[in-house]
Amino acid sequence: MKKDIFLLGSTGSIGITALNILKKDKKNFKIGLLTTNSNVSKIYKQAILFNVKEIVIHNQNKYFKNLNKFKNKKIKVFSSIQEALKFKKKKSHLTINAISGIAGLEPSLNIIKHTSNLAIANKESIICGWKFLKKELIKHKTQFIPLDSEHFSIWSLLKNENKINIKKIYLTASGGPFLNFELDKIKKIKPKYALNHPNWKMGKKISIDSATMMNKIFEVIEAIKIFNLNSDQVEILIHPKSYIHAIINFNNGLTKLLAHDTTMEVPLANALYFSQNKYKYNNSNFDYQKLNGQNFIKPDLKKFPLLKILDYKFDNTYLEIILVSLNDALVKKYLENKITYITIHNSMLEMLKKKYFKKYYSLRPKNLNDVKIMVKKVNQYVDQHF
C-alpha cells in the first residue's frame, strides 16, 4: 500500500527537494496534499505531475483568482489547511512542514492529529511554539522528526543512546560568506553578496540568517527545546566545509559525529524512509578526503555580535517570539534595501534591551492567538522605527 504524504510549503526550496525525491518512488508514496502561499503556477505544475487532487493556496486573492484553473483539472482547492483537513478521514503516513518562518506554526498545530509522523524543517515554529507542538504530539501519538540537517543529525546519533549521558553537543556553522571579513568591512554590504552562501543553496531569508549567524542561534535554541537540554550543553563551532553537521560528546568518553553532503536531500530522504532504511543516495560512496584537514573554529563575537543573544534565558516565554519576529522584520527590511547589513546586528541587540519588550520576558503565551498578537506587535514596532 502506498504511503500518504502531506507536503506543506511545496513550492519553496525544501518542498521542491522533497518532491524530487518522491518523484523517483511513486510506487511507494502518494501525495495527498500540497500547499503554497501564493506560487500558483508552481503548485499547479506539481499537482498535475504528481496527480494530487487537493491543494491549499493561502493567499486569498490568488485563491479566488485561480479556482477555475484547478477546477478544470478536477483538483480541489482550499484556502486553509483546516478546511482541507475536514475531508481527510485517515491519517497520513508523514507530513513534511517546509513552510518558511513563523507562519509554519499554525499549520503544524492543525495537522498533527491528521498525521502519524510530522517532519518539520521550520525552526521558527519550534522556537516559538514548541510547548504547544509537544502537547499536541503527545496527545495524538504523532512521532516528531526534525529536518534541519543539524537536528536530524542529533536525532540520528541519539538513537539507542540515553540522553542523560550527553555531555556536550556541538552544532557546526559554515560561517557564511563573510567568515574571513571583519564586520566593519561589510557593514554596508548589499543583499546580493550576503545571499551568496559558500556551501548551501537556500532561500533568501535563511541565507541572510546564515551570514549573521542568527540561523545558528535559532538552531541552538531549537536543540535545547527538542532534546530537552540545558543551555550549557550546546555549543557552536564554525566548520567552513559544512560536511560534519553535529558532534555529540558523551560522559563515557565517546564522541559521535555525523557527516553528509551539503544537500537537504539527505535528511529529507532519510526522514521519508526512516522506518525502512532503504533509501540509496546517488553520492553515497565514502570520500575519506572530505574528512582530511577538517577545520573547526570557535566563532568570534566581534565578527558575529548576535551570538550575545545566547546569554538570554529561553524558557518558553515571549522572548522567543520577540526574537524571531524582530529578526524576520529586520531581514525583510534589509532585503528591501531599507536598512544596512550592520543595522540588522545593532538594531536586534538594542531592541531586545528595550523596556517595551523586556517586560514580556517573564510572561508565557497561553495559546496560538497570544503568539500572533506578539508577532503583530513586533512588526508594528519595527515599522515605526524604520
Image (cartoon, rainbow, N blue to C red):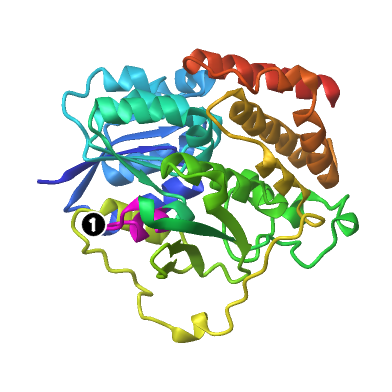
- Residue at x 61%, y 62% (from the top left corner): 237
- Residue at x 14%, y 46% (from the top left corner): 2
The reply to whether residue 281 is in sight is yes
Residue 372: x, y in percent?
56, 17
Residue 128 lies left or right of residue 271; in this view the side is right
Q: Which residues are magenta?
A: 152-163
Q: Label 1: which residue?
A: 25
The quadrant holding residue 92 is top left
Count residues near mark 1 (Cα–Cα under 10 Å), then give few for <14, some for 14-19, many for 20+: few
Determine the residue located farthest toward the front in the rendered image: 252
The quadrant holding residue 119 is top left
The residue lying toward the viewer, choosing from 228 and 253, is: 253
Q: Is residue 213 found inside the magenta-colored segment of the image?
A: no
The residue lying toward the viewer, choosing from 45 and 34, is: 34
Residue 247: x, y in percent?
48, 64
The residue lying toward the viewer, choosing from 74 and 18, is: 18
Residue 9: x, y in percent?
44, 38
Residue 212 lies left or right of residue 317; in this view the side is right
The reply to whether residue 77 is in sight is no
Q: Amino acid at mark 1?
A: Asp
